[in-house]
Image (cartoon, grey):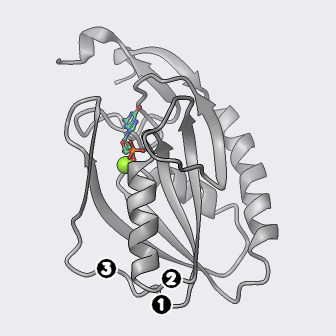
Amino acid sequence: MHEDIEKVLIAEEVIEKRLDLIAEKIRIDFANQESLQVVAILKGALVFMADLLRRVPLKLEIECLNVASYHGGTESSGVVDFLDAKLPDVKGRSILLLDDILDTGRTLEAVSKKLIDLGAADVKTCVLLTKDKERPVAVEADYSAFEIGDEFVVGYGLDYDGKYRNLPYVGVLKPSEINL
Ligand code: 5GP
Ligand code: MG
């Protein structure tokens, strides 16, 4: 797996240090919640969620949403499908929504809107990565660990064709590994 990576963009130790800071911010900002409702977007947010939430010493509950917004390639399709038969009960809750990356912003926008439609009182968003680019929708994450350039990355939850999610760092694939 590691041999397919052209460069490491964000090393594991760098991610860990940054998660300590983000977790501390979340602890302070949500300290008044009796129980924080986290909603994570599968599968990309899995690794980020596990590492981040173990650093947050608050009572919290986790729900996951299965959303498809990428369809195999390296370009965002812009279409967001909700794949779960049953969506979580979030009525009246303040939500911390987690995703791996803010790219076009369509996923965070669509999921935030869905959570509000489902009765959530408030939605705050938290991503590992924000791509520095012009977005078709005006969304910004409330918490973002790193800003990266507009390139396709894998690792730390992010996949290419279903693989590389278990890389412990964020990296860029060798062009020879991408089938266009
Ligand atoms: P959006 O374009 O809606 O902001 O991002 C949608 C989804 O596209 C993200 O949750 C993520 O799963 C995927 N995505 C966006 N940029 C990248 C990238 O550079 N690498 C990978 N592996 N997935 C990405
Ligand atoms: Mg995703």
| Residue that sits furthest to the right in the current view | 28
Q: Earlier in the sequence, mark 1 or mark 2?
A: 1
Q: Identity of the amino acid at label 2?
A: Ala
Pointer 2 and pointer 3: residues touching (CB < 8 Å)?
Answer: no
User: Within 10 Å of the Cα at label 1, are there few (<14), some (14-19), or many (20+) other Cα atoms?
Assistant: some
Going by the image, does 62 lie left or right of 77? right
Q: Is mark 2 within 8 Å of ligand 1?
A: no
The circle drawn on residue 87 is: 3
Q: Is residue 68 left or right of residue 140?
A: left
Of the numbered discs 2 and 3, the one sitting upstream in the chain is: 3
Circle 2 sits in a helix, a strand or a loop, which is it?
loop
- Establish whether ligand 2 lies closer than 8 Å to the Cβ of label 3: no
The residue that label 1 is drawn on is 91
Q: Quadrant of the N terminus?
A: top left
- x 43%, y 75%: residue: 115
Is there a contact, CB below 8 Å, between mark 1 and mark 2?
A: yes
Q: Which residue is mark 2?
A: 120
Residue occupying image coordinates x 20% and y 41%: 71
- Element carrying mark 3: loop
**Residue at x-position 52% and y-position 48%:** 138
Front disc: 3 or 1: 1
